[in-house]
Image: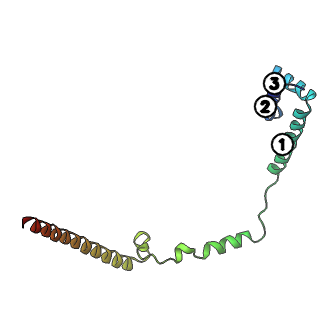
Amino acid sequence: MSEPRFCREVQSALPTLLGGEVHGWAERTMRAHLRRCPECSAEQARQEQLGEALGVLRSTRPVPPEGLLDELLEHVATPGMRARAAVPARGALSGARPGLSVAFLTVGAIASTGAGWAAVKGTQWAVGRVRHRSER
């Protein structure tokens, strides 16, 4: 049996050898090693089996299961959770419900403006009270 390092090198190069990409001295050395080493020749047999199985998969065209197209079309036709969710402003992006979207966006703008105005006035009032107390 050869040293384990050489076995690892031969086993890692097996796909290229089996693919016909190794030639000359390297090919002769690897084939001589495969004749002497039972572990590497077993790995070669496994890789040849795998190559044959992949070749069969490449040559056959997959056939979809019966009714797959109908199931997919039904799945696409039913609204998902996101489509059923109540998102008022969704129409603003898609244009689906422009009247409702404009109404909600207007109410939101007014509310945020009112909240901002109240925050400014509240801050001014608080600063005024602090100044008034510090002047005493």
Q: Is residue 21 visible?
A: no
Residue labelled with disc 1: 51
State whether residue 27 is above or below residue 110: above
Q: Residue at x 12, y 68 (%)?
A: 128
Which quarter of the figure is the N terminus placed in?
Answer: top right
Sequence-wise, the earlier of marks 2 and 1 is: 2
Report the residue marked by disc 3. Answer: 23
Q: Residue at x 37, y 79 (%)?
A: 99
CB under 8 Å between discs 3 and 2? no
| Quarter of the image where one finds residue 127 | bottom left
Quadrant in which the C terminus appears: bottom left
Determine which quarter of the picture holds residue 133.
Answer: bottom left
Residue underneath mark 2: 13
The reply to whether residue 112 is visible in this rendering is: yes
Kind of residue at disc 3: His
Q: What is the three-letter code of the residue carrying label 1?
A: Gly
Residue 26, percent from left and from top? 81, 22
Where residue 46 sits in the image (x, y, percent)? 87, 41
Measure how far apart labels 2 and 1 are at the Cα level. Answer: 14 Å
Other residues around mark 3 within 10 Å, as few (<14) / some (14–19) / many (≥20)? few
